[in-house]
Amino acid sequence: MSGALRARLGAATGVAILGVVLWRLGTGAFVDGLRTIDGLTLLAALGLGLLTTVFSAWRWCLVARGLRIRLPLGPAVADYYRALFLNAALPGGVLGDVHRAVRHGRDAGDVGRGVRAVVLERVAGQVVLIAVGVAILLAHPLLALEQLGHLVGGLGSPMAWAAVLAGCVALLVTAAVRRRRRAAPV
């Protein structure tokens, strides 16, 4: 099957699925949801989505370059958008990244390096996300405790205190591991 035929079949399948969903569930909820979105909010969401996708693809290009794999930014952005769609549409939430890794590896002639580039890129993204989250928690701990209290049923509940204790233990373990790594000779 040619690539053009496969793309047309994929688009037709997507339109058919959307048609069946609208036929079975109706358009009321969809139209009500569209009425609540104003143009400025939609533009801001599209702009932020574009920005984060381009930066994520750029991060992937940097990791691939570090592994000595050529990956131009334009195709990386297109592949990243495809992976985001597949992650959202398919069960598991990672099949788009698997497709991206294998496809890039085949194009580069080394599937192993392609997979490593995607895995390292995803890990780097998670590390940055965790670091920003910890920085926000350290900068505004009362805000975090207040939100946690709303989430688990009040600050006086045992679940809230257990979650706070677990977070403190995780921070202490992380600090101990970092201290041990710094002290160990390289």
Image (cartoon, rainbow, N blue to C red):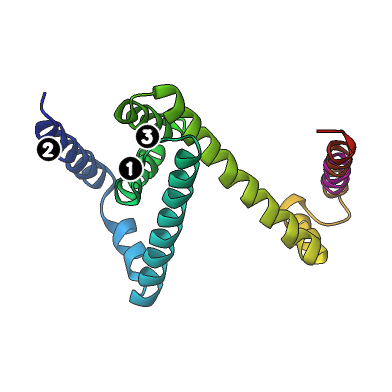
Mark 3 or mark 2: name the one nearer the start of the chain. 2
Q: Which residue is mark 1?
A: 79
Q: Position of residue 48 (x, y in %)?
A: 44, 64
Task: Establish if 161 lies above or below 102.
Answer: below
Mark 2 or mark 1: name the one nearer the start of the chain. 2
Magenta part of the protein: which range? Answer: 163-174
Would you say residue 172 sits in the magenta stretch? yes
Quadrant location of the N terminus in the rendered image: top left
The answer to whether the residues at label 3 and label 2 have Cβ atoms under 8 Å apart is: no
The answer to whether the residues at label 2 and label 1 have Cβ atoms under 8 Å apart is: no
- Provide the secondary structure element on which disc 3 rests: helix
Q: Main secondary structure of the magenta part?
A: helix
Q: Which residue is mark 2?
A: 8
For the residues labelled 2 and 1, the Cα–Cα distance comes to 18 Å
Q: Is residue 145 left or right of residue 116?
A: right
Q: Which residue is mark 3?
A: 100
